[in-house]
Amino acid sequence: MTSINFLQGDWSPSSWRSKTVAQPVTYPDEGHLRRVCDKLGRLPPLVSPGEIERLRHQLAQVQNGQAFLLHAGDCAESFEACTAENISNKIGLILSFSLILIWGARMPVVRVGRIAGQYAKPRSSPTEKVKNADGSAREVPSFRLSVDERNPDPERLLSAYFYSTTTLNYVRSLLASGFSSLNNPREWSLSHVRSPALREEFENISNGLADALDFCRTIGAEPGGLSGGAAYENGGARGVLGEVDLYTSHEGLMLEYEAALTRLLPIPRSQTATSTSQASNKTTTSGTEVLSGSDTPTRTASKLQETNASQLSAYNTSAHFLWVGDRTRQLTGAHVEYFRGIRNPIGIKVGPSMKTEELVELLSVVNPGREDGRVTLITRYGAEKIDTHLATHIEAVQKSKHPVIWVCDPMHGNTLTSANGLKTRHFSTIVSELTSCLRIHAACNSRLGGVSLEFTGELNEEGFSVTECLGGSMELAEEELSLRYQSFCDPRLNFEQSLDLAFLVSNHYKNERRGSKGGMMSALAEART
């Protein structure tokens, strides 16, 4: 059965092979690569069309100002860090951050984790020179692995699949068994957080939430199984307070891997019915297409069934959400060719080098139907460059009338190197870019729909957070970076710094909601002191 959704003109999951691949990986044994990709193509999907469509719907709500997008997690995952403790800490931080946002903004938060697949990262240079034991130099691939492990090996693609599967399975089990339940918010512990002020702020939220739930229970207002009745472990329903959606994402960099996990699958009936209804309403009211007298109701119903039966589309089943990076977004390149054909919602990184006409043309390529919730623009200019570029990009997109979600990535444009040679970022600079982003969107009559952050809840054996970014309420100094610097890629906000930022953003939206002053601008002044 052929579908125009799957084969869009000259598009197929392998049509990218005719284009130039940015950030290519050259495997010494192409036969080995083909065998691995064939195996990946036979393995089960990690995510389902129903979950992907649900995310598309929720992102359309973000686009329309009815929700906020939190895109967050590791810069890059490693196989070695795939442990129950690390995964629990990452999910716990995402949930804590989102709870703080919801409490202040009084708005649903769509949670998309950089998790269960973020194993590949683009490099500024494909190779680098390293010294041998005898002092001579040799050129090796520029990966974040030990020098002896850098030869491209297709088996790592299989490892990425199985580690992603393991991670996602554990995330699903955590969320299904009460890990995210708000029925007893006072049980949410931040005992490991060293800042008394942060602990107090979070306890104020959990106490306020607990009081609100107690009040609801007292007056009998428990819609949708608010209290949950019996415990989940005893056969009770999870209820509205025991369930959250958390979606997975990664950069779609390794096209061999992504293509192998792209499947032609039926679009859920709810979506085909909605599309058919919208198309029917559109043609009937416009008067340009009317059923002829020979189209009896029976024949029309038969046509509808045939249409639904053929509604198949190309879903990337490795993750719910994928993004194309700033280094791989070339209009005529392989990555854009691949991304334009999949039905998943996608992100596009937008940096200082993006020209306005290029941005508009890129949107036309990946979203010709101008579908809501399809494209998220993730801006990453740097605090010193955002004023030069963001407003012109917003105005160009507004003029084109392309529907997009604007998200601020205040991390990638603000990386620096410390005196001891470690890559780091300063908390105040991160806040500065986010503040400027909010200000510019407001001035352009636009709306910031979310944030994209690199953070981690990882703790060492003594219960201390990582030390990779400077500043924050813990006032992390440059000489302290090496204490617990664990990232093998880019520096991440630790648990305390992440909550610092969560409270700043939450208070901004709370003040905005109440019509009072003192949003992120005053927060920035505090962060710099």
Image (cartoon, rainbow, N blue to C red):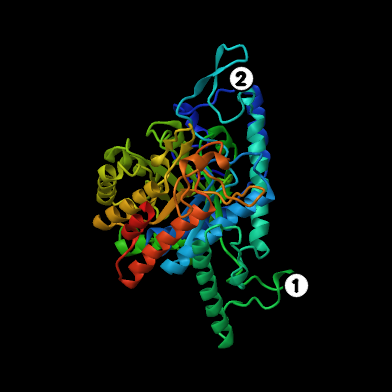
SS class, disc 1: helix
User: Which residue has dot 2 on it?
Assistant: 28
Q: Quadrant of the N terminus?
A: top right
Q: Nearer the viewer, residue 482 or 398?
A: 482
Mark 2 vs mark 1: which is more N-terminal? 2
Q: Specify whether residue 302 is in view.
A: no
* Left or right: 462, with 248 as reference point: right
Is disc 2 surrounded by few (<14), some (14 to 19) or many (20+) residues within 10 Å?
Answer: few
Image depth: mark 2 or mark 1 in front: 1
* Left or right: 515, with 127 as reference point: left
User: Which residue has dot 1 on it?
Assistant: 234
SS class, disc 2: loop
Question: In the image, residue 529 lies at what x, y percent?
Answer: 36, 53
| 518, above or below 218, in the image | above
Name which residue lies at 46% across and 50% down.
475
Question: In the image, residue 164 lies at what x, y percent?
Answer: 63, 44
Q: Quadrant of residue 279?
A: bottom left
Cβ atoms under marks 2 and 1 closer than 8 Å: no
Q: Quadrant of residue 238?
A: bottom right
Point out the residue furthest to the right here.
Answer: 234
Point out the residue furthest to the bottom here.
Answer: 219
Name which residue lies at 39% across and 61% down.
291
Is disc 1 surrounded by few (<14), some (14 to 19) or many (20+) residues within 10 Å?
Answer: few
